[in-house]
Amino acid sequence: MFRNYHAGRSPVERGGPAPPQRAGARHDGRVTRTKTPGRTGRPPVTSRAQIVAAARRLIDEGTWEGLTIRRLAAELGIGATTLYHHVRDKEELLLLLLNECTDQIALPELPEDPRERIVAAATAIRDALAEWPWAAEVLAVDGFIGRLGEPALKLVETVLDGAAAAGCSPEQSVHLFRSLWYYTVGEILVRAEPKGPGTAPADRDAFFDALDASVLPRLAAIGERWTDLAARDRFAEGLRAFVDGLLAQAEEERKGNRP
Amino acid sequence: MFRNYHAGRSPVERGGPAPPQRAGARHDGRVTRTKTPGRTGRPPVTSRAQIVAAARRLIDEGTWEGLTIRRLAAELGIGATTLYHHVRDKEELLLLLLNECTDQIALPELPEDPRERIVAAATAIRDALAEWPWAAEVLAVDGFIGRLGEPALKLVETVLDGAAAAGCSPEQSVHLFRSLWYYTVGEILVRAEPKGPGTAPADRDAFFDALDASVLPRLAAIGERWTDLAARDRFAEGLRAFVDGLLAQAEEERKGNRP
DNA sequence: TAGAGTTTTGGAACATGTTCCGAAACTACC
DNA sequence: GGTAGTTTCGGAACATGTTCCAAAACTCTA
């Protein structure tokens, strides 16, 4: 199974501590590498780096749906199934792409104020992820932060550090981070997916028009403005409010007011 | 990878308040009927209700992955492709299932305090959705609340109402709801998906063990406790903190401190 | 140089979601 | 009853992700 411990190392030729594999599962020998310290056997005609590069090429020129295993293999000039010896899954492929992107996250300037530091870090993560339409596909499948690359993990670290600087206990820091992570993932997913039916602006209007104002007065009243309001990017504002709330809660908790 | 191109139309027996639809764009299927006031033509051998029931049957006895179009069709005794005349998509099928579940949301007791009212409503939504493993599949695809059934919408209304009672403007109410919605969706998705590789507890431990404590000290330090801490359900606590923060922010804003 | 061991490779094949398109079945009206 | 219009039905077929399995290619050692 592919894990991400070895973030930062060169993409080809990396072993890494492979988690215990269930027997029977046939996976690419690249990650597992049960034996053979000195590589032997037929040399691969394709490296992981090339795969990722080709994938990006396919995505860049064309829609993101255009990235299929077979097409990617064709782009690389190899058989489709061969790809599965370099990449476990399509999901792993996406993850590689995602990591390639998060690996380029620039650490933002970090303000002194712990609160602002947290906001800056979380916003940086979100901005990096939100840039890639397929991030949602991966996040939806496994939300565990462990799959992020080291630059992203540094931002996680920053969040935790800010929490600690604001007086949070480790437990409280984790709680804070997880909460913010939920918010972030939710924002990316909900925001990045205007593709289902009923999500087009016209459909939204129709939806609100059809609401029964006597049953759902607030919703109906807001309806006409919903689309406009939703268009505004208020992620950072929500984030700030959330951080404030969480920090205040943590402080309360420390005072023993609410165990 | 759910697509959306579909030119045909899916027949339904019960009409309902149909928003004006262009050909091809359908809300959730229980609309349409472009012509034919008096139904004519061959009567369907299967109703939507039967489809949903059969789908639930398949899910209940067996894994959720066991629900495939062909199997469902077989269960119903019809051809696989026939199903596509009743349901536009597999996604729509999931949506039907989801709605059937949210339609049974019981309105919780609503406290007087606006803040607690909001918390209660949001928690009810989350609990209802979190109960269904496939909710994530749908939410990940289209987050628009318009796809929820009316009982769920009533909870949305409650949130908006609580916000208003706390003094929020409509704009602020929307902001508050959206923020909470992001948080909720994120929680459901991240929490409901321990299935990717690397998400097993053992893998998590391995992940944290591999962290470089000199680069990511906080993360490494927390590591050992992460799994335990993550296991605790603190959704409501986070929610409460969020609401507090958002309400405070709204009030600040109203005072003109931060436009 | 001849294995032996190991790795890479890819064709065939399967399950699934989905579309095409023609045939069947039914209602309404003449 | 017959015909037109409309609806439902479903087999064939396609793209995709994925696994099986056996052959090919390479390195190392004897």
Image (cartoon, coloured by chain):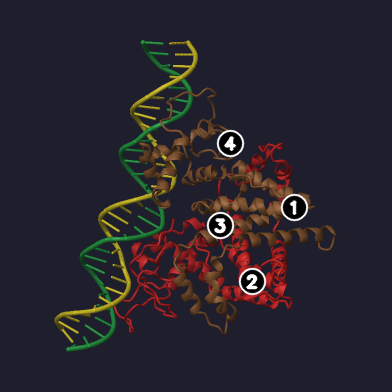
Chain colours: A brown, B red, C green, D yellow
Q: Secondary structure at mark 4?
A: loop
The image's mark for residue B99 is: none
The mark that comes first in sequence, 1 or 3, is 1
Q: Are marks 2 and 4 on the same chain?
A: no
Q: Which residue is mark 3?
A: A188
Q: Secondary structure at mark 1?
A: loop
Q: Nearer the viewer, mark 2 or mark 3?
A: 2
The mark that comes first in sequence, 4 or 3, is 4
Q: CA distance from mark 2 to mark 3?
A: 20 Å
Q: Which residue is mark 4?
A: A8
Which kind of residue does numbered mark 3 sit on? Answer: Ile
Q: Nearer the viewer, mark 1 or mark 4?
A: 1
Residue B228 image position (x, y, % from top left): 71, 50
Task: Return the chain for callout 3.
Answer: A
Q: Which residue is mark 2?
A: B172
Image-based side of D26 in relation to A112, left or right: left
Q: Is residue B134 visible?
A: no
Q: Nearer the viewer, residue A239 or D15?
A: A239
**Image point (53%, 66%), residue name:** A231
Q: CA distance from mark 1 to mark 3?
A: 26 Å
Q: CA distance from mark 4 to mark 3?
A: 25 Å
Task: Return the chain for callout 1.
Answer: A
Residue A216 image position (x, y, % from top left): 58, 80
Q: Which residue is mark 1?
A: A113
Q: Nearer the viewer, residue B111 or B54?
A: B111
Which kind of residue does numbered mark 4 sit on? Answer: Gly
For the C terminus of chain A, the quadrant is: bottom right
Classed neighbour count for the residue bearing mark 2: other residues with Cα under 10 Å, few (<14), some (14–19), many (≥20): many
The mark that comes first in sequence, 1 or 4, is 4
Residue A50 image position (x, y, % from top left): 44, 36
